[in-house]
Amino acid sequence: MILFRRYGTLFALALIVLVFAVASPQAFGTVSNLVNITQQMSLLAIVAIGATLVMVLGEFDLSVSAVVSFAGISAAALFAAGVPIAIVMLAVLAASLAMGAVSGFLVARYRVPSFIATLAFGTVIGGLTFWISNGATLFSGIPAVFRDLGRGTILGVPVPTLWLAGVAVVFWLLLDKTEFGRRLYAIGGNREAARLVGLPVRRDMVVAFALCAALAGLAGLLLTARLGSAHPTGGGGYLLQAYAAVFLGMTAFREGEPSVPGTLVGAAIIAVVSNGLTILGVPSFLQDLLTGAIILAAVLVRNVAREER
């Protein structure tokens, strides 16, 4: 029972993979499809890793989908104006970082509930995105070299998968192996106690929100690179799925605590379910229903396991 409680989500992922591999061995159970799944989950997982930072604090950032859309539209608009790739990427990431810092400042300094602050600020970002794009899809002037960042391969591995691997390693080390990460967990455990022992609570919260938004901005850049275009609502599907991945991950490895490895498992479950159901020809509305049921079941299993301790 202890083993199941600690690694139940991993067992669930293995079971889901086995079911789809048996149901469609020639389409699902192939190396090429496994590589495809890692590419499909890459952007979602990057956004979810950012959300993990904020969830460690016991907070939410509901502006991540708006930042994804803003980053994509801003990049496309800058490319249309002839701005070089390096400057575009730096400018978009810096703007995303600044947006997250504003949200974090509102939450940390003025104690505005993160749900309200980020929802309101996300609405502002969404309006700015529509203003930049005039509500239209932008696709002109996006360089081929930039598009390779979202759809190219290196030694057979999709570039987005490599982006995810790099982000996952960096932020796993940041949360688990640095003083900053330990402070975030301490703040999430008891903010007032962390403040009383002298931890820089406000600064660390601002940094966490800023990094969360920066990762959403990176996902927006990669999404535009993958599609070769940007839409003002292009990031709309990432908010709920990103937090679903985090919540699923909270049932793995560490009981009730967000972690980067757990979030990766959660994102993998979502990607595998979506991929497998698509291969089996299941309609999209049923995919949403089944994905939601899996998330609910994972949370229920975690709570039942806790009560039995």
Image (cartoon, grey):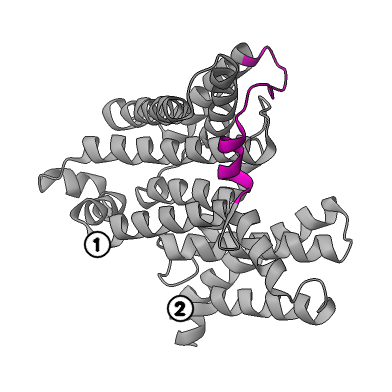
Q: Position of residue 66 (x, y in %)?
A: 56, 30
Residue placed most toward the observer, 96 or 262: 96
Q: Position of residue 268 (x, y in %)?
A: 60, 64
Front tag of 2 and 1: 1
- Magenta residues (range): 133-152
Quadrant in the rendering for residue 223: top right
Q: Is residue 220 visible?
A: no
Question: In the rendered structure, which amino acid carries the disc numbered 1?
Answer: Lys
* Residue pointed to by mark 2: 6
Q: Secondary structure at mark 2?
A: helix
Count of marks placed on residues: 2
Please tell me the numbered disc located at residue 177: 1
Q: Is residue 211 left or right of residue 125?
A: left
Q: Residue placed at 47% from the left, 86% from the top?
A: 3
Q: Position of residue 14 (x, y in %)?
A: 63, 79
Quadrant in the rendering for residue 13: bottom right
Q: CA distance from mark 2 to mark 1?
A: 21 Å
Q: Secondary structure at mark 1?
A: helix
